[in-house]
Amino acid sequence: MDATTAMYVAQGIHGLAYGMVLFLVASGLTLIFGMMGILNVAHTAFFMLSAYFCYQVVAWTGSFWLALLLAPIATAIVGILVERFLLRRIHAFGLLFELTLTIGVMFVIMEAVKVFWGTENLPLPVPSLLEGLVSIGGMDYPIYRLFIIGLSLVILGFLAFILYKTRMGMVVRAAVSDADMVNALGINVPRLFMFVFGVGTWLAGLAGVAIAPILTVFPGLADQMGMDAFIVVIVGGFGSLGGALMVAIISGLLSSYGVQFVSQLAPVLMFIFMAVVLAIKPTGFFGEREG
Amino acid sequence: MKMTKRISSAIIVLCSLCLLGLPQAMAANAAFDVNKMADMSDFDPNHPVIPTGDTIKIALVASFSGPAAVVGQIYWISVQWAAHDINKRGGILVDGKRKLVQVIKADHQSRVDVCKKVCERMVLQEKVHVLWGTDGSHLMKVINQVANKYKVIALCAASLSDDLYDAQNFSRYSFMTSFSTEQIGRAFAYYYGQMRKKEKKFYILCQDYLFGHQMAEGFKKGLKEYYPDAKIVGEDYHRLFLTDFAPYLTKIKASGAEVIYTGDWIPDAANLLKQARQMGIKLPFANTFMDEPNFLHAVGVKGTNGLVHVSQYGVEGGAFKTPEQIKYYKAWNDLWKAGKWGAPYNSRLYEHGTGNIGAYRAQTYWLLSVIERAGSTKAKKIIKVFEGDTYQYVIGKVMEMRACDHKAVQDLHIELYVPPAEQRQSFNIPPYYWYKGYSVTGPSFKIPRDKVLPKADPKLCK
C-alpha cells in the first residue's frame, strides 16, 4: 500500500473505531429513551463513572481485563439503583421531572468522582496484550483501536441477538412500541424498565472502559463525549439502535475524513450534518418519537 | 607569570559570580531571600492557618469546582505557601502596622458570569486588595474589568493571552507576571532557528479558540523572525476536549513534519501525546503544558523522551546552584516526602514545587514584596512601585515589570526532556533525577529576554 492510500485507509479505520465507541455510548442512551421515554442526561456521567471504576480496578489488581468485566457491571448496578429508587418514584410525574432528576444525578456523579478520585488526570495504560502496532497491508495500525472495533462489533451482535432472537428482546421491542399494552398483557414493566436502564448504563460503562486507555480519566470526561453521543441519538432517531449505529459510524468517518480534507470545518461538520438531517427529518433518520 | 595567575583568578571569580547570578541580584530592586523564610514545617495546604481581622486580602479567583478544579488546587497551595511564609514572619508593614496575608478562595467555576459576580463580591463584601487570577484569558479579562471598575489590584499570574494587555483591554490596575502566548511561540522559534538549527519542518496543532490561534501566531511570527528557512508543513486547529486525535496525527505523519508545535493544555495535551505514542509517532512536541507528572508517567520514559518544553521557571544548567536554593526546594519537598499533606496534595504533581507551581509561588512573593515596598494596600501606591519594578526569584531569574503595558519582561528557558539517568544535568543534587518513571528536564537553554520581549501595543509602548 502506498503512503497516500495508507493514509486514507487509516483515516477510515480511525473513523470506524471512534464511531463504534460512540455507538456503545449512544446505544444505551437510545435504548433507554426508546423504552422508557427518558432522556437520560446522566448517561455520559455513567460513562465517566465506569472509566473511574476501570482505573480503580486496574490500580488494585493490575488487570485491564478484570476491569473490562467489573467496571461496566458496577456502573450498571449504580444505574439500576438510580432507576429503582429515584426514577421509578417520579415516573408518573412526566418527562420534565425525569429530565430534571437525571440532571441532578449527573451532577452528583460528577462531584462524587472528585470526592473519591480527586480532580487530577488519571492515566490508564493500554493493556500489554494490546500494545503496539499491527501491519495491515504494509500500514502500521494500533492494535488497541482494532480491539475497540472488534469489541463493539461483538456487543452489537450480542445486542442484536438479545433483541431479535430472544423472548426478552421481543418484550423489550414490544414495550418500545407500546408499554401500556405490554403491561396489560401481564409483563412486569417496571422490572423491565429497570433491566433496560441497567443494560443502557452497562453499555455506557463498557464504552467508558474501552476508551479510558486512549484518554486520561478526569472529571470532564463526560462533557468530552457527551455532545457527540447526544448528536448520534438525535440524528439517528430517538429509540433507534440501527439509527444510532449508522449515525455513529457516519460521525466517526466525518470526523476523520473531515480533518483530512476540510480541516477548518472539521470541528463543526457534525453540527452541520445534524442541522441538515433535522431540517429535512425532524425525528432523525429512524426516529418515530420526537425528542 | 604572576600577572597570568592574577588574570586567571579574576576570571574564575567573575565566572563564579556569573554562575551565582549575582549580577542579576545587583540589578534587581528586590529579591527573595531564603534566609528570611520562616520555618515552614507546619504548612499544610489542606488545613491552612487563615488570619482574620485587619489583613492584606488576596482573592484567589480560579476554578475550584468543575472539571478544571485541579487548577484551583495548584494555585491554592502556591499562593497559600507564600502567605503562610510571610505570616509566620509576622506579616508585612503596611498602612502603619504589620498585617498578615489572608487568601480567600473565589470560585469562578470556569464561567464568565460567575467570575464577574464572585469578583464583585470579593471586592465589595470581602474588601480584598488583590484579585489573583486565573485559568482562562476570557476570565482574566473579567477580573481585570472588575479591578479597573473598583480600583483594586489584579495579578495575572496564570493567563497567557497577549490581548489582555493591549490598548483596548489595558487596565492600570492589572499586572501580568506570567509569560504570554507570543513569548512562548517566539522562544521556540528562537531555539529551533538560532540555537538548535536542525529540524526545519514544523506542524502546528492547536486548540480552535482564541488562545490556540494566538499560540500559533506567536510561533509563526517567531519563525519569520528567527528561522526564515523553516517550513510549516501543516496547520490545524481542533476543538477543545477532543476525544480522538488519530485523524490529526495521521495527517501529521503524512506531512513529513519533524516537530509538532502545540499550544494545547491538559487534557488535550495529554491525550494528544498519549495517542501519538500509541500510534507509533515518535516526533518531538514543542509545547508548554506537557509537564503534568501523572500523565507523563503513564506515557513512560521512552514516550516522553525528546519532548521540548518552554518554561517560565527554568534555569540553565543545574537547578540548584546555591545552598539557599536547595534549602528552598527542600522546605517543600521534605514536607511532601514526609506525607504530611493529604489528598490531593500527596500526589506526584506536588512533589517538587517547581515548574508552574514554582512560578506561581514566586509571582506571589513578588506581589507581596511590591506591597511591602509600597508600604500600603492602596492600589495607587502599589502601582507606583510595581511599574518598572525588578525582582529576583529564588532561582536567580530577574523579572521586570514593563511600565508601559504592565507585562513582565523575563528570560525564558527551553528544556529538553531526557531519561532519568540524564536528568542530573538539571536535578544536580541527590537522587539526581526529577522523576524515575518518565523523561523530563535535562539540558536547558536560556532564551534571553530581549529575544522574547512580550508583545507590545504601540499605542501603549512607544
Image: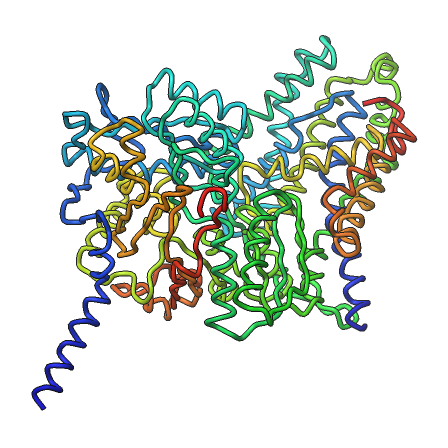
For the question of whether residue A16 can be seen, the reply is no
Q: Identify which residue is drawn at 66% across, 11% down.
A: A89
Q: Identify which residue is drawn at 85% across, 42% down.
A: A246
On the image, the x and y values in percent for residue B93 come to: 16, 31
Q: Is residue B283 above or below residue A90?
A: below
On the image, the x and y values in percent for residue B303 come to: 52, 63
Q: Residue furthest left?
A: B2
In this picture, residue A3 sits left or right of residue B351: right
| Between A274 and A101, the one nearer to me in the picture | A274
On the image, the x and y values in percent for residue B447 come to: 41, 63
Quadrant of the image occupied by residue B121 = top left
Q: Residue furthest top?
A: A93
Quadrant of the image occupied by residue A69 = top right
- Colour scheme shown: rainbow
In this picture, residue B42 sits left or right of residue B309: left
| Between A254 and A245, the one nearer to me in the picture | A254
| Between B393 and A146, the one nearer to me in the picture | B393
On the image, the x and y values in percent for residue A172 come to: 82, 27
In this picture, residue A129 sits left or right of residue A138: left
